[in-house]
Image: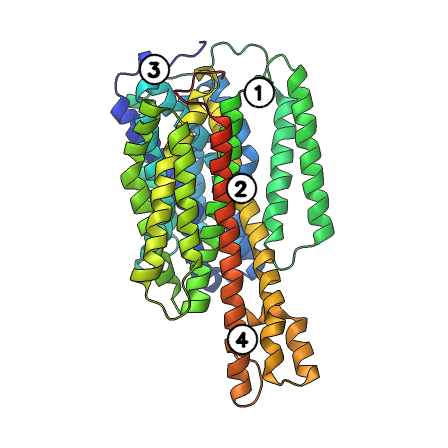
């Protein structure tokens, strides 16, 4: 094993704190801005397109540069690249807080994404390097639990800061956290890297990987925008896929590849990343659909809808350290088969409630069961990714898995919106037929079914407007049920992948 790692670490608990705090910067800022959009629109005069790219600029650079960030850590030193990422993130957070215009805020957010791409994969690689394999599952479980808590808690913290102080405070808060992380990294974290890497950096591969991941990320983001241009989006996605195919071809011939082709031939590593795509696709769809259904169908405010999902990360956090130890004791097969199946049950429960039903007896059980399922499988899944390959590849292994989870989330949101509208439109026509509407009115309503998804009464006289809204509500309930059922199917597919791919017993590097 050509890696300087576990034996050199004297303060593993402090390393855990350092990596949790460092990665929390990126996870919080991935979601905190969403609750500040109204304030940004008011204070900076940002338009709808500006608001979209204030959110998406961060996601674009993060998704494009993850693989490069992980590979740089393996080659140049994981602590060095991690600390560089924290510095970049802190400085760009100051730029965000001081931004006088939407354009400068978008640019600063993009730089934040660069910092996150350096620190996120290397935080997990540092953690993996600091703990011996027999204790790694519990440590990574703790890291995963905090990651879930900070991602879900971002909107809550952001909402409090925006309401109490200003949207700028949501960026200023990163600075003292970053300072603490940098001090802890200098004191507690020993340098680790792939000492077997020889030769120059694989810059052609880096350019192709960044270009391919960047184009695919942009295409998936653009799919969710109202003013997207399908031919341009399809062309960007095709070009991105082509660049990644060329990247893999070059890596197979490179003496010092950015992504060693041998990693993709490791059964457990490949299966874990396929499982990540399916499972995080299901979760991403649920996170998109659940609050939307609460707001549209059940009259929740945005704050209430966010709070209604908080039991999920709490359950995941409580279970994460315990479930991380399951891998150490039983191997990956039991938690990675059982966990997604439980999550599928939770998604099915979320699809069931109808309008007018109380949260505590209908929605909460689904949220709790989903949290149990994800809590059982996510920490072992992350650990499998890190122990399935030699420690020298920890950075790039973490980056590949992070990229898989982010692409899965983008794919889920891009796909579930059209599915929701299609099922809604298919159910709307038979629901409207019995209402004795005139042919022109019926044709006008069916020509733009998406306009009825907000359940606002159309300009019709008397009880007909109410009847149309009731029909649209019934069709929308069906659409949400079908869409959440589709996400449950993805979770079941991930359980089936685990049953097929993982053998009984522990995972060894290279299996």
- Tell me the number on the disc at residue 265: 1
Q: Earlier in the sequence, mark 4 or mark 2?
A: 2
Q: Is residue 357 visible?
A: yes
Determine the residue positioned at 62% across, 52% down.
223
The mark lying in front, picked from 3 and 1, is 1
193 vs 162, nearest the viewer: 193
Determine the residue positioned at 52% across, 88% down.
463
Real-space Cα separation, disc 1 to disc 2, in angstroms: 21 Å
Query: Does 471 appear above or below 219?
Result: below
Neighbourhood count class around disc 3 (C-alpha, 10 Å): few under 14, some 14–19, many 20 upward: some
CB contact under 8 Å: marks 3 and 4: no
Reading the image, the residue beneath label 3 is: 6
77 vs 504, nearest the viewer: 504
CB contact under 8 Å: marks 1 and 2: no
Query: Does 283 appear above or below 198?
Result: below
Query: Does 394 appear above or below 449?
Result: above
The mark lying in front, picked from 2 and 3, is 2
Residue 435, picture quadrant: bottom right
User: Where is the N terminus found, in terms of image quarters?
Assistant: top left
| Label 1 secondary element | loop
Reading the image, the residue beneath label 2 is: 408
- Tell me the number on the disc at residue 471: 4
The mark lying in front, picked from 3 and 4, is 4
Task: Give residue 424's position: percent from left, percent from top.
Answer: 58, 65
Q: How is the image coloured?
A: rainbow
Real-space Cα separation, disc 2 to disc 3, in angstroms: 31 Å
Q: Is residue 58 visible?
A: no
């Amino acid at each position: 094993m050509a890696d300087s790692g576990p034996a050199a670490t004297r303060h593993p608990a402090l390393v855990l704190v350092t990596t949790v705090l460092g990665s929390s910067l990126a996870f919080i800022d991935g979601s905190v801005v969403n609750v500040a959009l109204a304030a940004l629109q008011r204070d900076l005069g940002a338009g709808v397109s500006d608001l979209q790219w204030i959110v998406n600029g961060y996601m674009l650079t993060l998704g494009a540069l993850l693989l490069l960030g992980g590979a740089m850590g393996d080659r140049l030193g994981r602590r060095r690249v991690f600390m560089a990422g924290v510095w970049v993130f802190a400085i760009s957070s100051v730029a965000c807080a001081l931004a006088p215009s939407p354009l400068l805020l978008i640019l600063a957010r993009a730089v934040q994404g660069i910092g996150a791409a350096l620190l996120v994969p290397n935080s997990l690689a540092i953690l993996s390097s600091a703990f011996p394999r027999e204790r790694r599952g519990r440590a990574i479980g703790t890291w995963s639990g905090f990651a879930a808590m900070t991602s879900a808690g971002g909107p809550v913290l952001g909402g409090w800061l925006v309401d109490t102080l200003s949207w700028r405070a949501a960026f200023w808060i990163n600075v003292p956290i970053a300072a603490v992380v940098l001090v802890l990294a200098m004191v507690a974290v020993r340098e680790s890297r792939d000492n077997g890497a020889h030769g120059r950096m694989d810059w052609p591969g880096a350019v192709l990987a960044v270009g391919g991941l960047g184009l695919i990320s942009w295409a998936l983001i653009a799919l969710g925008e109202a003013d997207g241009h399908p031919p341009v989006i399809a062309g960007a996605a095709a070009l991105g896929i082509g660049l990644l195919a060329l990247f893999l071809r070059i890596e197979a011939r490179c003496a010092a590849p950015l992504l060693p082709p041998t990693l993709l031939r490791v059964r457990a590593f490949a299966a874990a990343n396929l499982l990540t795509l399916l499972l995080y696709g299901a979760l991403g769809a649920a996170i998109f659909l659940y609050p939307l259904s609460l707001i549209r169908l059940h009259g929740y405010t945005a704050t209430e809808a966010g709070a209604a999902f908080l039991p999920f990360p709490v359950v995941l956090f409580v279970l994460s350290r315990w479930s991380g130890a399951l891998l150490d004791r039983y191997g990956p097969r039991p938690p990675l088969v059982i966990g997604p199946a439980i999550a599928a049950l939770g998604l099915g429960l979320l699809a069931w409630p109808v309008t007018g039903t109380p949260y505590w007896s209908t929605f909460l059980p689904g949220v709790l069961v989903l949290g149990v399922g994800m809590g059982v499988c996510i920490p072992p899944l992350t650990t499998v990714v890190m122990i399935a390959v030699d420690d020298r590849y920890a950075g790039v292994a973490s980056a590949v898995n992070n990229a898989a989870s982010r692409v899965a989330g983008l794919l889920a949101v891009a796909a579930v919106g059209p599915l929701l509208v299609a099922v809604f439109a298919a159910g709307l026509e038979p629901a409207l037929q019995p209402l004795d509407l005139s042919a022109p009115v019926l044709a006008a309503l069916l020509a733009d079914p998406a306009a009825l998804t907000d359940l606002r009464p159309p300009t019709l006289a008397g009880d007909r407007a109410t009847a149309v809204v009731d029909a649209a509500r019934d069709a929308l309930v069906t659409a949400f049920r079908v869409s959440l059922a589709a996400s449950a199917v993805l979770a079941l597919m991930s359980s089936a992948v685990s049953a097929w791919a993982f053998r009984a017993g522990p995972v060894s590097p290279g299996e």
